[in-house]
Image (spheres, helix red, strand yellow):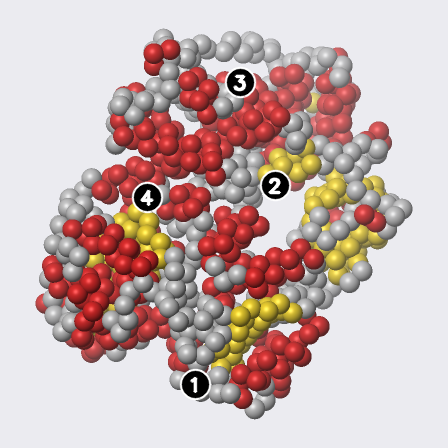
Amino acid sequence: MATSPALDPFLRPLRFAARNDFANLGVLKDLEGTLGRLLARADGEGCPPQILIDLRALLAGLDDLDRGEKRARVTAMIRIAEGGAEPTLETPSDGTRGPREKPRPSAPPPSRPPPADVSPTPPAPDEAGPNPKRPLPVARSLFRAAPKVTPSTSGKRQPMHEAEPATSLAKLVGVGPKTAERLAAKGIETVQDALFHLPMRYEDRSQLTSIADLRPGDRAHVQGVVAASALRAGRKRMWEVAVRDGTGVLSCRFFRFRRQDMESRLAVGTRVRLFGAVTFFGAQKQMAHPDVEVVRGEDETAGGDVRPVYPDVEGVPSTTLRKILQNLAQVLAAKVWDPMPESWRETFHLAPLAPAVHAAHLPTDVDAAALHALRRRLAFDELFYLQLALGLARGDREAQPGLAQNVDSGWRELAERALPFSPTRAQSRVLDEIAEDLAAAVPMSRMVQGDVGSGKTAVALLAAGLVAQAAGRQSCLLAPTEILAEQHARSAHDVFAKLGLQTALLTGSTPSRARAALVRACRRGDVSLVVGTHALLEPDVQFKELGLVIIDEQHRFGVEQRARLLAKREDVPPDVLVMTATPIPRTLTLSLYGDLRLSVIDELPPGRTPTETRVYPARQAGKVHAEARRALRAGRQVYIVFPLVEASDQLELKAASEAVEELREVFSAHPVELLHGKMRPDEKNEVMRRFARGEVGVLVATTVIEVGVDVPNATVMIIEEADRFGLSQLHQLRGRVGRGTHPGLCLLVAGKGAGAEASERLSVMAETTDGFLIAERDLQIRGPGEVLGTRQSGLPDLFVADLVADGQLLEEARGAVEALLESDPQLISPDHASLRSELERRFAGKLERLRAG
């Protein structure tokens, strides 16, 4: 007998599936959808909510499971729906096999109160607010105290409503073994981990859009009827589905599919709802891999909901992940206990944590004030713990003993002797900051940020010369490419020769005999500065006394590589100077590089002519090529950049490898060569050397030339499909021309599908050459993850915080962290144990890697 009469209709298809040793299991189609609708009816007829939650958890992804796991799920659902029957089968009187009822387990225990030493009571009035003079009051644990769950040896799974925050997901009803394993690989092992695997955005599916009203770039919810559904054979197989809604036709393309699923779920005449990004191919409106829901019966006129979208977990369907997380939030979010003191919540206007976690997974309205409040709270927590990790990493490094290098302000005398120009005011300011760091008895960790052509290399070389002359120590400069290393080596030789100091170049192309001699010279201390690529990281490359490590375009290197370089000196860490030519907005700098001291070179040397930038539509390619021919006839050289190496079935974009032959005809009077990242390193280097020597007139390339190419004779940069690039990337590419005595010209060619928004975005490039202004606009348009990528030091992604909209919140979180670390620099106070524990949980053991970065 069912635990609730409302579940009788739900049990009928389950019992049918279980007959004859589950012989009918393969007969039932769309079992997940059918059972889901029956559960929805039971919900409205008074079925106990905890039972419904457990059953919904078991339903998640049911149709995608193999037969064995599907059978286990069906058995478990029958057991729960019948009031506790064990998953064993015996033959009933009618000769079929079905589940045998066993006594129902006792009711779940009541929620445990907080332990005696952890009180959710806010601090007394005289303790309210953060105080930099004493430790901040924080909770002892994120959750109310619960005993650590010991894995069951019987293999029996717990219903979700009986779980505790520390319960392993692998022990829960509704989370299969394979799913649990894949979640664990992503760091989601417990209920606590799952509740804080937060959505990265929300999709409002509460409104349906007619096909006639779809616009390019929309993420829209459409309902219609399948008019055609077929496999399209070609260079790449795809399944195409045409959907009509009475106002037009939408083409949906699937490149990853199972034919049987497509034929059964998307047969002609099926009513479906689709959600996805809209693109146009000519006049045809398209979606690639939209979310598909089959509409049945009474659901035909319904709209949709506000749906959280989570970061992907490989091997776990998004629908399965969403159902698991929402079911957990439904029953366990209330157990979240807020470690933030009430005084802090009042100071920063933060919502309580438990309702925020619940609403994050189960939103009701994208625009509701409650959703805004929860977003603000979760964003503050993300920013707070990120700033705390960065602050601890910086503090740990600065607490180590370092090299006190007696350099004073001697760089001015060096500059007069070695440089053919006087440093700008910005360069002088940065050199003073570096000299002060070098003289201190703690390791320097400073980033020099400057626009293309601002003179960062000159600053770095003067710092290395200062270390050599004033302290008698060596330096090394690590560059990401051989071309860039060779350029730096030439500049270093010009500077150091005037100071009577020796430099050397070490790359993968250095001959064995020359390399062996260089390694011996480094160990003797004969070489003051070694410039190189990854070859510098080899174990046999050692220094007599390494004083300064310089890393150019540091985001190109991983943490392990930087750590290997710093390990070249074992007694005390050398000083570290990293450089980047990518202008970074302040909010992004604080979030990605808050563990480094920052210097900014915010002016260009006098006499540098800004590169002119023009924007052209694709149909005006003739005018663009005419400008290039004009420069070639004058003896100059040209770059032509494409977004792809090879053509893609999914993207209607030009590709470098296909365009190069056509361009050889267009510029038949001049040598045209191809350069891209898939070529062997020796091939790339040879092409670049020929271009640098002037033997190649037109270089057709991908963004491999974005960094490390300095050819003063190249004056024209053509960027095809320019609307596909970020503004900061376009700015970096533009910086490759106009580096000599001749002015540069950058021609941005928009793709055929570029709309008004893309043209407006590209117009920013034509209006300004200010890299910092461009970076701010790029951050607003694309977000931090696309602007710079994830920093290679173990920093977590920000799923809630928006570094454009939450600049003030970031400053508040940073202020709170500074006050906290002023009172407890190492976060070792017992009062802060839970804060440290939560930090470790969020960073999943990556704090040590961050310290090395």
Q: Position of residue 245 (x, y in %)?
A: 86, 45
- Mark 3 vs mark 2: give the one in front: 3
Q: Mark 3 points at which residue?
A: 334
Q: What element carries label 2?
A: loop
Give whichever of discs 2 and 1 has the lower sequence position.
Answer: 2
Callout 3: few (<14), some (14-19), or many (20+) C-alpha neighbours within 10 Å? some
Q: Is residue 691 above or below residue 428?
A: below
Q: Name the residue under label 4.
A: 595
Q: Amino acid type of disc 2?
A: Pro
Classify residue 484 by image quadrant: bottom left
Q: Which residue is drawn at 75% across and 54% down?
A: 286
Give whichever of discs 1 and 4 has the lower sequence position.
Answer: 4
- Mark 4 vs mark 2: give the one in front: 4
Q: Name the residue under label 2.
A: 317
Q: Position of residue 751 (x, y in %)?
A: 66, 65
Q: Amino acid type of disc 3?
A: Ala
> Is 498 in front, or is 690?
498
